[in-house]
Image: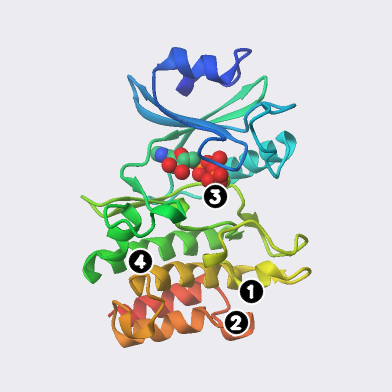
Amino acid sequence: MNDLLKLASTEVDPVRLVVRSGTVLATFDHHSQDSGNVSWLVRTDHGDLFVKTAGTPGPQPPDVSMPYLDHGDRVRLLRNAVELSRSCDHPCLARLRNVIDSPSGPMLVYDRAPGELIGTASADRDDPQTAYQRLAHLPSDGLIPVFDDLLDLHRTLAQEGWVAGDLNDGCLILDFSTGRLTVIDLDSYHRGASINVMGRMFGSTRFMAPEEFELAAPIDERTTVFTLGRLAWHFGTRLTEQAEQFCGPDPLRVVLEQALEVEPDKRFDSVADFAAAWRAARR
Ligand SMILES: Nc1ncnc2c1ncn2[C@@H]1O[C@H](COP(=O)(O)OP(=O)(O)OP(=O)(O)O)[C@@H](O)[C@H]1O
Ligand SMILES: [Mg+2]
């Protein structure tokens, strides 16, 4: 068995353990992410794995801007992601295969999700080759099922109390050949309702609910409803944000418009209610 799948703890530095356990296909660090985390895609005898760490504590190299969260807070988010994975089993989650305690915090070992990341740097969003554009221009019988899956995952997560945080197009990996969706990077999800203590919370403005910009506002399932609605609206209108361009039938558009009400009270009360209305409108 590969060390990455077997060890519960190690005295070895994560990068050394990764390098000796397989072939590194990609590294995700301050060059590509702003989280401060360091992760790798690794080819092993037991398949391709995604290994995520909080990076190293202490000062960053001089060319690196300081991440918003310090190492301790990044470790807390990774432990939160472990709790989420262990609480919920759904085909749209990348399977967490192992967690290894290392000298610089936990190493989360996931199965590699098949397909392509939908999130694209803003400079490239007009490029028709990107997964971002290709998702938005799928035929509706390819596009709407992606949102069936996204909603079903969040219905299941909400049953366990999870409220979405920082859910955006960079969390979606789609295998265009099979239609299989995997949702990644759920580290900032919060178990239970909470209060906005940040003002502007973490997230991509395009998909955030009004209460995520408002200090002391309640953050709850209705916030999840809004963000899911935004994702479905953004791609379902084929990036135009225009109701006339919506790819689905009218009743489905009406359901989304309710999910996108500015006032949380006017949205669906729960992700389950939203998902049920969505399914009814699909028929
Ligand atoms: N299970 C997975 N399978 C394949 N690739 C993955 C997987 N999880 C993440 N990735 C890739 O690794 C990248 C970094 O992962 P992730 O977004 O979880 O890191 P992060 O440190 O939280 O970064 P961010 O600054 O985007 O929040 C993703 O954008 C995606 O391309
Ligand atoms: Mg992240």
Question: In terms of sequence position, does the residue under pointer 3 or pointer 2 come before the other?
Answer: 3
Labels 1 and 2 touching (C-beta < 8 A): yes
The tag on residue 60 is: none
Residue 165: name its quadrant.
bottom right
Q: Which residue is mark 3?
A: 186
Tell me the element at label 3: loop
Q: Which residue is mark 1?
A: 210
Q: Which residue is mark 2?
A: 262
The tag on residue 148 is: 4
Residue drawn at point x = 60 percent, y = 82 percent: 262
Labels 2 and 4 touching (C-beta < 8 A): no
Question: In terms of sequence position, does the residue under pointer 3 or pointer 4 come before the other?
Answer: 4
Mark 3 burial class by Cα count in 10 Å: few <14, some 14-19, many 20+: many
Query: Does residue 3 appear in the picture of this structure?
Result: no
Q: Quadrant of the N terminus?
A: top left
Question: In terms of sequence position, does the residue under pointer 1 or pointer 4 come before the other?
Answer: 4
